[in-house]
Amino acid sequence: MAPPTAIWLIRHGATEWSRNGRHTGSSDIPLLPEGEQEARQLAPMLAQQSFSRVWVSPLQRAKRTCELAGLASQAETVDDLREWDYGRYEGITTAEIRQTVPDWTVWSHGCPGGENANDLTRRCGRLIERLLSCDGQVALFAHGHLLRSLAATWIGQGAQGGSHLILSTATTSVLGFERENRALMRWNAPCR
């Protein structure tokens, strides 16, 4: 079977916590009205694509983005698309964490009681194995740190490579191939 022709990464629309920088892993935060509008704006562009598979995180912000973007009828929930588990850092900001761990980043230190970059690299590796068995284009609706980790793992950098990739809400990115090499074909593209 041929590998997928393209893997579309779609980050969910804005939430209250994404707007104010709070780490939002397992907390099932809804989209803000502006996040719902962002998700609707994805629909015309995504309608021009043909997806063989649509996978979505189990969290409502990703599911609602998928729905408003017009792809809910094809969606399969995939647990490995859930956001990074921030453990004890769930719901707090990097600035707050750095009051006790001055040089903390999710990429270098991980999260007490949650996941670290090695955990994410393994999870992303499982996702990639599944993706490589898909034909055509695949759409993934998920979260900022998870999608950054997935893209970095795709190009051989492991999850820590995601520290070099910025990803805004309700943007699209595309993973694919340059000949036999895995590549980033598009990154952090707004739908507007």
Image (tube, rainbow, N blue to C red):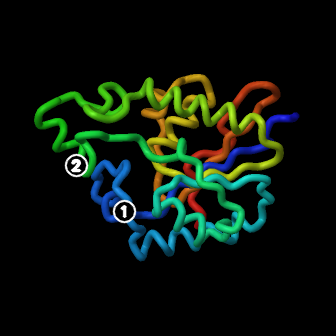
- Residue type at numbered disc 2: Ile
- Viewer-nearest residue: 50 or 168: 50
Name the secondary structure under disc 1: loop
Residue 136, horizontal then vertical, whole percent: 82, 47
Q: Quadrant of residue 106?
A: top left
Q: Quadrant of residue 88?
A: top left
Residue at 72%, 49% (x, y): give it. 138
Tally the marks.
2
Q: Which mark is residue 149?
A: none
Residue 41, horizontal then vertical, whole percent: 59, 71
Position of the C terminus by quadrant: bottom right
Q: Is residue 124 left or right of residue 20?
A: right
Q: Is residue 101 left or right of residue 53?
A: left
- Distance, label 2 to label 1, CA atoms, is 14 Å
Q: What residue is shown with label 2?
A: 92
Q: Is residue 139 left or right of residue 11?
A: right
Position of the N terminus by quadrant: top right
- Residue type at numbered disc 1: Ile
Q: Residues within 10 Å of mark 2 (few under 14, many from 20)?
A: some
Residue 89, horizontal then vertical, whole percent: 24, 42
Residue at 86%, 35% (x, y): give it. 2
Depicted 138 relative to depicted 40: above or below: above
Q: Which mark is residue 29?
A: 1
Residue at 67%, 53% (x, y): give it. 139
Depicted 95 relative to depicted 13: above or below: above
Depicted 18 relative to depicted 43: above or below: above
Name the secondary structure under disc 2: loop
Q: Residues within 10 Å of mark 1 (few under 14, many from 20)?
A: some
- In the rendered image, the residue lying farthest to the right is 1
- Viewer-nearest residue: 99 or 111: 111
Foreground disc of the pair 2, 1: 1
Sooner in the amino-acid sequence: mark 2 or mark 1: 1
